[in-house]
């Protein structure tokens, strides 16, 4: 077993593709494939499963991968200490629903990182891909929500993938709309009052089951509905069409200052949390990311209490 083989395993697990991993580590596909095959034979363990959709880590491979990444991190720290040059850039990847506070927390982690070089990834994506990214080792952390409408289905999927959910906070649904919106000054808004305005939601690709929806209020119940993929488009349509969306009510400095939130009179709760692989400890970067999110959430709540007092 060599450090180079461990680097190959790490790259394939991260990319989920032999070809993409080969480009990342500057190796040919045959070299990378043969190296991993030899390692699996040496260990008498299948680290990966090859399918038409790509490469996934086996249950046995998950335990090996965790140890391999620890060895690579230790080797990098030793090299940095004695040669002044690390052999592995710090890596961190997170997949999340479209939460501005998650983006802000990610920026805090990047700014606090002391390495001269690093390889970080932030993916704002659909719910099914968040779960798949964490299950397939493409992301260390996933950020999504549970509610009365989706919890049973989502938890069933998480159990199947051997993932666990850890709650960050619970909030009542809020309507996000423009400061100039006709309903902006109301203390609370009922779903019926929103019928005249377009409901902007995030589309979920081919996995469009209702329990994957990013919004707790189903778009299927609305008279006017527009689906988008990215947050910039969402913001433009909310401002330009007197549209609205539904979220947790937690603001962040990264969010457009022209958009406010008003409580929605809907009998449900949004329980935002992180998902991770069961029994796997967070890296320091992941710990810092989750801690930063908790800090931003608490800061937002404190600001709201002062505003309402």
Image: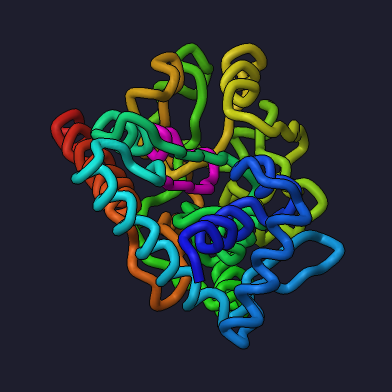
Answer left or right for 255 relative to 26: left
At x 24%, y 36%, the residue is 84
Where residue 50 appears, as percent x and y from the top left, is 78, 69
Answer left or right for 164 relative to 30: left
Say if the magenta span includes residue 4: no
At x 68%, y 41%, the residue is 23
At x 26%, y 48%, the residue is 288
Answer left or right for 136 relative to 78: right
On the question of residue 268 being in view, the answer is: no
Q: Name above or below for residue 221 compared with residue 200.
A: below
Say if the magenta span includes residue 101: yes
At x 32%, y 46%, the residue is 289
On the question of residue 309 being in view, the answer is: yes
Q: Name above or below for residue 285 compared with residue 66.
A: above
Q: Name above or below for residue 178 compared with residue 171.
A: above
Q: Quadrant of residue 174?
A: top left
Which one is nearer the viewer's eye here, 266 or 255? 255
Say which quadrant the C terminus sits in. top left
Where residue 11 appears, as percent x and y from the top left, is 58, 53
Q: Name above or below for residue 204 compared with residue 157.
A: above
The segment highlighted magenta reads 91-103
Where residue 307 appears, as percent x and y from the top left, is 19, 29
């Amino acid at each position: 077993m060599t450090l180079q083989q461990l680097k190959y395993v790490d790259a394939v697990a991260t990319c989920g593709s032999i070809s993409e991993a080969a480009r990342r580590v500057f190796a040919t596909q045959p070299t990378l494939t043969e190296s991993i095959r030899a390692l699996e034979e040496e260990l008498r363990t299948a680290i990966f499963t090859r399918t038409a959709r790509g490469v996934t880590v086996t249950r046995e491979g998950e335990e090996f991968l965790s140890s391999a990444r620890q060895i690579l991190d230790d080797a990098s720290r030793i090299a940095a200490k004695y040669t002044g040059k690390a052999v592995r850039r710090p890596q961190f990847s997170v997949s999340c629903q479209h939460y501005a506070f998650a983006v802000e927390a990610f920026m805090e982690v990047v700014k606090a990182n002391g390495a001269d070089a690093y390889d970080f990834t932030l993916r704002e994506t659909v719910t099914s891909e968040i779960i798949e990214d964490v299950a397939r080792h493409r992301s260390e952390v996933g950020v999504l929500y549970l509610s009365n409408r989706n919890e049973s289905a989502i938890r069933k999927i998480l159990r199947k993938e051997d993932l666990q959910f850890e709650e960050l906070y619970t909030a009542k649904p809020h309507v996000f709309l423009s400061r100039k919106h006709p309903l902006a000054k109301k203390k609370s808004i009922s779903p019926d009052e929103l019928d005249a305005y377009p409901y902007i939601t995030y589309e979920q690709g081919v996995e469009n089951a209702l329990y994957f929806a990013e919004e707790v209020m189903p778009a299927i119940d609305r008279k006017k509905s527009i689906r988008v993929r990215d947050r910039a488009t969402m913001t433009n349509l909310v401002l330009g069409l007197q549209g609205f969306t539904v979220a947790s009510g937690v603001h962040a400095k990264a969010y457009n200052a022209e958009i406010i939130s008003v409580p929605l009179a809907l009998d449900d709760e949004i329980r935002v949390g992180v998902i991770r692989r069961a029994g796997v400890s967070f890296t320091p970067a992941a710990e810092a990311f989750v801690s930063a999110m908790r800090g931003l959430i608490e800061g937002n709540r404190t600001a709201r209490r002062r505003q309402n007092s």
